[in-house]
Image: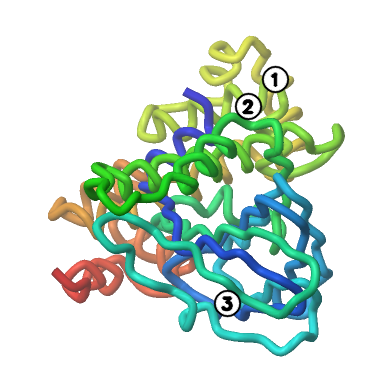
Amino acid sequence: MDALSEVLRLSRFTAGVTLDAATRAPWCVSVPASGAVARAHLVVEGQCVVRAGLGDVVALRAGELALVPRGDAHVIGSAIGDETVPLTSLLKTPVAGEMMPIRLGGSGAGARWIALTVSCERHLAEPLLSALPSVMRADLSSASAFHWLVDALGLTLSASAAPPVGATAERARLAELVVIEAISRYVYERPPGGKGWLAGLNDRFVGRALALVHGRPSEAWTVEKLGRNVGLSRSALAERFSDVMGEPIFAFLTRWRLNLAAEYLLTTQRPIEAIAHEAGYESASAFSVAFKRVFGKPPSIWRKRARKKPG
């Protein structure tokens, strides 16, 4: 399995449709910052613009998706600066699985916009989230998933029709496919010579090494062993990985193991000593120091997060 798929799987990536809006200029919607979810915006017809914080304005045309991966506050509309309405005021609970479109704006140029919610365990999705820009744009106009989602949202009930069976689950799965396709296309379209995790995915040898590290993190890896698996010598892989990723293999592996350790602390009752050993540390004290440096609190305090989560 490839590294992107491993990160999405381990971080329990999910998505869903929250809004299907027919708009006419002028219109502008404000989306609050969130530490729990990210937002994606898919333009079906017309065009609009997105801006996160004080960043650059990103223009979107029909078939394009904008992902705000780290949950930053942002606005989307026909133009930045128009009077905004909060996204929360537009959301409506689907009735019997049916999501009714809403209308928004004035009497100007029309557009259709679909808002998506994206969630994951952020400490496990960190390699991906930290590598993406504040607003990631991707063209999905030729993607099957885009058309499947639009078709699914176009199905409406007639006066005599029964409630749509499985519609909510279908929309969620299609939303996931749309976002994954957008991320994949963004990765593939990166120009050669880049640095970092996304560039590593596109590199023939580094991408294979990342897949192994993400998929089998507790294995007793050495650079030589990874090199044999990807088809490079020890020195060639070490040099190539550092050049593309901007850090040595074991610096990356250590951070990924710590991310997994954070998840084990939340989801299992395994002793901290055992988790420390699997993360590559000989003692719980050394593990605690490294863990606190990354997550801002020692493992024992981090574990208490699980008890605070609502049931």
Q: Which residue is drawn at 77% across and 85% down?
A: 82
Q: Which amino acid does label 2 sit on?
A: Gly
Q: Distance between the residues labelled 2 and 3?
A: 35 Å
Which residue is identified by label 1?
A: 204
Which residue is identified by label 3?
A: 31
The answer to whether residue 226 is left or right of residue 168 is right
The answer to whether residue 234 is left or right of residue 51 is left
Q: Residue at x 77, y 59 (%)?
A: 47
Q: How far apart are marks 3 and 1 (CA)?
A: 38 Å
Q: Which residue is drawn at 82% across and 69% down?
A: 57
View extreme (front): residue? 159
Q: Do the residues labelled 1 and 2 touch (CB within 8 Å)?
A: yes
Quick one: quadrant of the C terminus? bottom left
Residue 207 is labelled as: 2
Q: Do the residues labelled 3 and 1 touch (CB within 8 Å)?
A: no
The answer to whether residue 173 is left or right of residue 72 is left
Residue 232: % across, % down: 67, 13
Give the mark count. 3
Q: In this view, does 100 lie above or below 105?
A: above
Residue 289: % across, % down: 41, 66
Q: Which amino acid does label 3 sit on?
A: Val
Q: Which amino acid does label 1 sit on?
A: Arg
Residue 164: % across, % down: 28, 46
Q: Residue at x 40, y 49 (%)?
A: 156
Classify residue 174 by image quadrant.
Answer: top left
Q: Is mark 2 on a helix, strand or loop?
A: helix
Q: What element carries label 1?
A: helix
Q: In this view, does 147 lie above or below 63?
A: above
The answer to whether residue 257 is left or right of residue 150 is left
